[in-house]
Image (spheres, grey):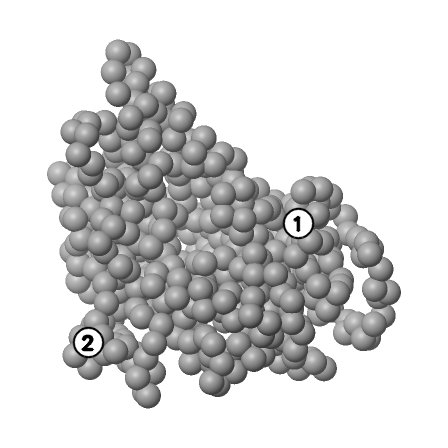
Amino acid sequence: MRVVFTRPTATPPRPTPPHSTPLCPTPPFTGLEQVESGLRADLLHCLRVCDESVVLPSASRSRESGSFKNVVFRFSGSDTGLDTDVFSPNWFGGVSVVAVPTDVAETLLRDQAKRKTALQKLQNTIKSEMTDSSIEVGPGLDADESDRDKAGWTCGFDSPSCCVGLFSARQSRAPEAGQSGMNRAHSAYYLVCKSGGGLAAQTFHSRLCTSIKAGKTLDESLCPGGSPGSQALRRVSFAAQRNRTRILEMAAKAMSFHTLDTISDNAASPSAPHRGCIPNIDVTYNSLRRVDGVARSTWQYSAGCIDTVISQGLITSSNIAEGFVAFTSSNDEFRVNLRNEAYNSLPFATPRIKTTKEIAEISAKAHKSAMEKGVAHSDHDFIKDHFTWKSKQFDSGSSVDIEPPCFWGSHESESFLSSWARELGIATLKQVRLAPEIVVVSPMEPAKLRAALKRAQ
């Protein structure tokens, strides 16, 4: 086992000879960044002697789901005994971004009435499993002999961390390409969607964990004829992307952006064809793929971080009020190639500060006090002007509308770029910070929301 808690460099790694590290009870730890002791212990508990991991900046393990964030794993595909706790059920989640014409976006944002109408349309258009338990989001995992869906499916939000909407940015670029020395700040606008694969991801997770716990290796589980099998891996790797492009197409229509390019989904069922937007950026985290060019069978799992080998462009997240950080080349192109010793990966998730349970208690107390003193949230006006959500309705008849956990400080802001850009290989790229303008987000989980509403009364 080789666990690397290190500051990666932008040069390709040297191949490690087999058995160059002694198989000792406590593997050696090298690196410049101190790793939290709890995370270190969790990694040592989950990894086998044939596995290794690289811990990126802002790495953590969720106290609620147990999923790792910003950790890259490399597992032996031919050995049994893999701990399935390392896997997140949100397989191949990610973010897709499509550029919006500046004049069209600014026309919408300047008119306050149109802005409110767009927020309401977004809320009514985008479906969420957090709002209606009868909704099942995402394509099915099983397909016909042509890898097409067997039936139609519903696109939408499959988890509490999803969002879609219009984001604004200030980009430093020349008025026209090739005009050196004339860079200035330009306004730019983008539709951004963060969502997962829904039903396909959940089914894949269940089948893979069952197979591994039954004593199968990764190679046996993901080979043709295995469970879940190679076709299932292929299907789940595109499920979230297909979901996001459909959500973007629906969001564009809701905000009257009719000039965006779309393309037909070739994996859709012939009886239920549909189209999706063509993204400028499409990144994936929680991905699993076989590593080429190594001596033995190896699988790479990017937990909560972006695998740039299978992603298009680069983007990372901050808290919801700050938005996202995208990257462009010196020529303002979104197609960039990242190479670093962290297996060409980039951190995506920011550290979690409070659990949903803690936030439910805080928000309920704030709303109970607000019945006497006024608004509950200190940033109430900004949230209502820029965001919307549709919480699940209960029979209690409560009129309290509790904000989703992301508005109560669930996650820290992005903090690794100022310290780690050179080592991660992104120092020469331009940062484009995307700020929310008209965004619909997932509401609080129904169980937590019910408890919070009872406490707020």
- SS state under label 2: loop
Q: Secondary structure at mark 1?
A: helix
The residue at the point 58 percent across, 79 percent down is: 219
Q: Kindly identify the residue that appears in the image at 72 percent across and 82 percent down.
A: 295
* Residue occupied by mark 1: 42
Residue sitting at x 50%, y 57%: 88
Q: Amino acid at mark 2?
A: Pro
The quadrant in which the C terminus is found is top left
Closer to the eye: label 1 or 2: 1
Furthest residue toward front: 214
Q: Position of residue 70 (x, y in %)?
A: 58, 53
Q: Quadrant of the N terminus?
A: bottom right
Comparing 344 with 29, the one in front is 29
- Is residue 275 placed above or below 65 in the rendered structure? below
Residue 114 quadrant: top left
Residue, disc 2:
273
Left or right? Give the position of 198 relative to 172. left
**Position of residue 221 measured from the top left corner of the image (x, y, whole percent):** 53, 76
Most foreground residue, 177 or 81: 81
Give the mark, 1 or 2, whose residue is nearer the N terminus: 1
- 120 or 228: nearer the eye? 228
Query: Measuring 56% from the left and 56% from the top, which residue is drawn there?
Result: 85
Q: On screen, 204 above or below 255?
A: below
User: Residue 341 at what x, y percent from top left?
Assistant: 69, 64
Q: Is residue 66 above or below residue 149?
A: above
Please state the horizontal and vertical placement of residue 138, each as a whole percent of the image: 30, 64
Gap in angstroms between the C-alphas marked 1 and 2: 45 Å
Let me know if residue 398 appears in the view. Answer: yes
Residue type, mark 1 in image:
Asp
Mark 1 vs 2: CB contact within 8 A: no
Closer-to-camera residue (227/375) = 227
